[in-house]
Amino acid sequence: MKKEKVTKTCTHIGGQAVMEGIMMRGKSAMATAVRDPEGKIQIESERLTPPDKRKKITRLPFIRGVVNFITSLIDGNRVLMRSADVAMEDEEEQTKASKWLEEKHHITFDSIFSGLALVLGIALAVLIFVWAPQFLTGFLPESIFDKTSTGLEGLWFNLAEGGIRIALFILYILLISLIPSLKRVFMCHGAEHKTITCFEEGKELTIENVRGCSRVHDRCGTTFLFIVMVVSIVVFSLVNLAVVKWLPIDNEKLYNLVRVGLKVLMLPIVAGCSYEVLRLLAKTRSKFFLIFKFPGLLLQRLTTREPEDGMIECAITAFKTVLDMEADPTVPERVFATPGKMSALLANTKKRFAAADIDGEEAEWIFALTLNIPKSEVAEKEKVLRIAQAKEIIRIADERLTGRPLWYIIGDTDFCGYTIKVDERVLIPRPETEEMAMMAVGIAEEGNQVLDLCTGSGALAIAIYKRLEECNRKVKVTAVDISEDALALAKENAEANEADILFIQSDLFKRIRGRFDVIVTNPPYIPTAEIDTLQREVKDYEPHLALDGGADGLDFYRRIAAEAPKYLNRGGTLIMEVGAGQAQEIVKMFRGTSYSMVVQDFNGFDRYVKIVM
């Protein structure tokens, strides 16, 4: 049987192993997937400025390598620290010192540790890979290895120094691989490579497929570091010949210190050249260049280990998240649930909401409801969140970013001070409708009959009943809706609020008997053609049955104008909530009534029509 040829698909996505997870980075998005102590995968993602939108100078050959090196160093350290926050167990209590730092200076131990780790990491790298090789070459015989020579002795010296640097690099990898936590990082490194390779081989990203792929890859950072070692031999040799040799310094210690300083200054050049070499080697499949790739690929056998299935799952999750974000600019960013300052997570949540055109006030509501604190305190007071609290806030925020309305996610909302359960069966009660409830309360008298047409969640009927009850005015309230599902929820709300309301399933007045002193209604009033232009959370989640008012949005008002007089007692009042620009047209429908007026809402819009029979 002829073996099927595998078509390789190159991808620009690269990655990095982190604590108990993997970071994947594309041209315009980055995502990190980490398994937390509960065994769940947490994802943090962010959008990046794509290369073609960056400054032109940062995209030039050699310079782009320096930019990528610095960016990777900073972002890599930041992501590593963030992953550690997720992978470690939550600390229930803060120390007095950490509380003092946060309250007085608005800094955390995490931020201090992250900055310190970056500085110490750079210092350690300079010590091991710049100073140590130079120090060790001091033990070599000058007759063969002469750092000041421009001849063969100088060449041998630079080759020896470079060889020592490579040997120290390999020894460093071997030593850190003995640390248990870093062994797991190397396993995650293997999962990263296998996942990218699986995608490039055109296979479906499943745990089984990824497990069978190679754990070495042409574009690995380990290969890059090896290339850096080799390129540094050439660059440092040239610097030694062109600059250091001619320095008028007689003091040996000062001379060596200057050589170290110049090598540090040359690191950006080394990084830029190494990056171009890595790009060239990664692009070619020629066997001729295998000899140049082989040492780096061999080193990857030390920096990668065969991963666990859970690590592969993290790598796949991170990779797919980057693919989704790059394919669809509307996919929201995500954040880890980690303990920390409330203000930081609040700012991040507002940023994510702003990108999705969601009011930042909703972010404050999420924090207030989750933490059970007044909304006014959210932006004013600092609070340290535990991981369970952060997780719940992020869960709600993530679901809100799908477009689902916040109050459906929360499960209830406040209406006139009463808790009203809401879900996709009913419209979410709006603040404007509260004004209509208060108008009805101001009109109704002891013993009156009150009718709520198109009751939905029952919020209007419940608020009227409860407020009148608190005023010692006993009335009988009937609530009507065409939707059986809506009525089921309205009955739950009435029972929860201890409101004695009669519910009837009816298409407006069809199944209504008797007359009423007050009728309130907030019927569907959106023109059919405009529904698709509404906000996503309205048109995609709230019931169209409660929105669609016909071609011009006035179908229900015409029916109410024709039928309401039969059901209103003499002197009775009809109060209707109306849509923008509809009030005057609706008033014209009630020409034969004793009195009609348009009432504005708290925003100054014509929102209600009041009719007296």
Image: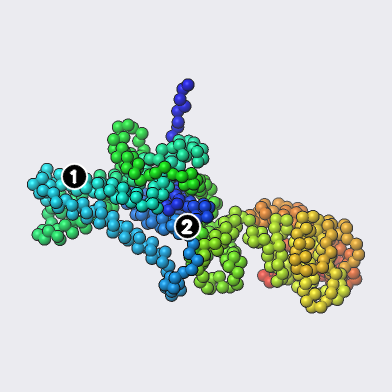
Residue 403 screen position, x and y as percent: 61, 55
Q: Is residue 235 visible?
A: no
| 509 is higher (above) or lower (below) than 107 | above
**Does residue 70 appear left or right of residue 8 in this picture?**
left
Q: In this view, does 563 lie above or below 597?
A: above
SS for dot 2 = helix
Residue at figure coordinates x 50%, y 57% from the top left: 335
Residue 484 rendering spot, x and y as whole percentages: 79, 55
User: Which residue is rendered at x = 67% and y = 56% of the image?
Assistant: 538
* Amino acid on which the number 1 mark rests in the picture: Leu
Q: Is residue 91 left or right of residue 229?
A: right
Q: In this view, does 18 lie to the left or right of 394?
A: left
- Contact, CB < 8 Å: mark 1 with mark 2? no
| Residue 291, x across and y down, in percent | 29, 35
In this view of the protein, which residue sits in the foreground, 501 or 271?
A: 501
Residue at the spot 79% in from the left edge and 78% down from the top edge: 471
Q: Name the one closer to the observer, 360 or 525.
A: 360
Dot in front, 1 or 2: 2
The residue identified by callout 2 is 86
- Residue at (57%, 66%) from the top-left corner? 367
Q: Position of residue 433 (x, y in %)?
A: 73, 67
Tally of numbered tags: 2
Distance between mark 1 and mark 2 Cα atoms: 44 Å
> According to the image, label 1 marks what residue?
159
Label 1 CA crowd tier, 10 Å (few <14, some 14–19, many 20+): some
Please tell me whether mark 1 sits on a helix, a strand or a loop: helix
For residue 548, above or below residue 459 = above
